[in-house]
Every structure is written in C-alpha cells, then in structure tokens.
Amino acid sequence: MKKTIRIGTRDSELALWQAHTVQNKLNTLGYSTEIIAVKSTGDLILDKPLYELGITGIFTKTLDVAMLKGEIDIAVHSMKDVPTSLPKGIVQAAVLERANTLDILVHKGNLNFLDTEGIIATGSLRRKAQWLHKYPTHIVEDLRGNVNTRMQKLHDHSWNGAIFAAAGLERINLKPETFINLDWMIPAPAQGAMVVVAMEEDTFAREALQHLNHKETEICTTIERNFLKTLEGGCTAPIGALATIEKDSISFEGVLFSLDGKEKHHIKKSCNFVDYKSFGGNCAQTILEQGGAVLMQQLRSQLKVK
C-alpha cells in the first residue's frame, strides 16, 4: 500500500504556495500527500539581522529537525535559503523548474531619489552591498519578515523603496505596478528555484520526487551553490551567482562584495555540460586567488562566523 507523503513547510503564504505546488504535482502523479506547516526561527525573530541569528540554515533548521524526528517525510524550501551542506541523512531530492531570477525594487512615488539621496530597505547583505556599490550616497535599512510583512513595513515607513525577489512576489500575486527590474544586480545562488529534500533512506519519497526534478535548473543551481560553498559564504554573505544555459554551453556570473559595497570581486565565464559539476567551485577558486580569500576572512570576522 502506498504511504501518504507528509510535506513539511514554513507557514508563510509564499512557503505554503510552494508546498501546495509540490503537493499538486505529486497528487497528479497519483501520490497521497499531507501538508504540515511549522514556524521557523527565522520567521519568529524579526528584530535582529539575519547574520546575527547564525549564518546558515535559519529558515530550514526547524524542518530539518522535524524530518530527522520522523514528523515529516519531505520539506519544500526556497533553494536560496538552504545551506550548501545538508544535515547528515537528508538529501536533495528534486529541484523544480526555475522562476524569475531577478531582484526588483518596489518603490513609492517617483524615482528621482536614484540620482540624489535615498533610503532603501533590505535584510540581505548581498542586496545591500550591491546597492551601495551602485548608489554609495544612499542609506540601506534592515528589513525582515516574510514577503507580506516586508511589503507592509515598506508601506508604513518613509523609505523610498525595498528590494524583493521577483519570483516570491509573482508567486503570490503581490507584485505591485511600482517596481523596476534590477537587472544589474546578481541574484543569490539558486534564487527563483524551489528545492525538495527527503531522507536519504526514504526510497519511496525520493522516487516520487524524481518525477518533479527539472534537469536544467538542477545544473544551474548546482554551479551557483558550488560557487557559494567554495567561497565558504553562508546564505546571508554578500555573494551573488547566476548560471544560465545557452544552447550547448553554460554561462556563469559570480560576485563577492565587502559589506559596504566598496570592494568587488567579479567573474564571468562559460563552460560545457561535461564540466559543470566542478565549474562553480573553479570560478570561486579564481576569485579567492585574486583577493577574495582576504575579503572572506574579513567577512567571517565581521559576521562573527567561526
């Protein structure tokens, strides 16, 4: 008899949308499913910057524990929130087809502030560093919470705008008309992608999820996450990476910034499909050898990462 696959998720509107997307796909394939929502530490503590809560896994840890305790069978995550090293016994089982990778600026009123002085909000060190690199006279305020909470905070404050991932707002129809695409900003590794993890020994769930895996997205996110892992930067470090498939090759662009955005290490290269598994790590190694290693040491000190 087929068992019911228990799908673990955070309880935000976006997280539940993602979980229901996976549920619908599994149900279409004939699998029985149940959604179990839990609140993560990252959702509960909104008065501290992310990096002060621990550099990695703040949104995934609660679901990891639930899976290891046997309370859920699989967990659905925004892939950019997932640490590059999964807990022992938990494996990546499927990466769904990627959505929009762009960051966007949701703004209030006109955009004249871009040429003068402005106040922008984001909880991401990557977005903050890239914004300050381009707009050094601006102030960047910390902004925490799920997308609904952040949108409300933008409305309540006198900020000129706030930065969001386009994919999250599009998925729950929250994207307003007052936005601009930040096509110059390199997204977080795996931004726009959803990942489903399962227990390594759970062959039933893993076989079910294999039907949901999108190979091109898996390849691109593998490159980006290997770039991140080799730099030894957590999800909150100022690191951006984007791989895109173009016919018979893969293009990649990666960046590492100082917290104030003044120092930038950048790489842009292509590779073939045979070498993709080592490509992201090799690109990161190039950055480390060209001054990135010193910056990473400074970042670890500044972010109090051992």
Image: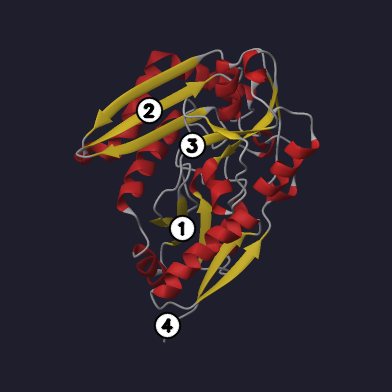
Q: How is the image coloured?
A: secondary structure
Quadrant of the rendering where the C terminus is positioned? top right
Left or right, residue 82 beside residue 204: right
First in sequence, mark 3 or 1: give its number.
Answer: 3
Q: Residue at x 39, y 43 (%)?
A: 221
Say the numbered circle drawn on residue 2. Answer: 4
SS of the residue under disc 4: loop
- The image shows residue 167, relative to residue 304, as above or below, that is below
**Which residue is nearer to you in this view: 68 or 181?**
181
Closer mark to the observer between disc 3 and disc 1: 3
Q: Residue at x 33, y 37 (%)?
A: 244
The CA distance from mark 2 to mark 1 is 25 Å
Look at mark 2 in the image and give the residue it sits on.
253
Residues packed near mark 1 inside 10 Å, few (<14), some (14 to 19) or many (20 plus): many
- The image shows residue 178, relative to residue 119, as above or below, that is below
Q: Residue at x 38, y 69 (%)?
A: 208
Look at mark 3 in the image and give the residue it sits on.
102
Closer mark to the observer between disc 3 and disc 2: 3
Q: Residue at x 55, y 17 (%)?
A: 134
Q: Amino acid at mark 2?
A: Glu
- The image shows residue 181, relative to residue 176, as above or below, that is above
The CA distance from mark 4 to mark 3 is 40 Å
Look at mark 1 in the image and give the residue it sits on.
196
First in sequence, mark 4 or 2: give its number.
Answer: 4
Residues packed near mark 2 inside 10 Å, few (<14), some (14 to 19) or many (20 plus): some
Q: Are marks 2 and 1 in contact (CB under 8 Å)?
A: no
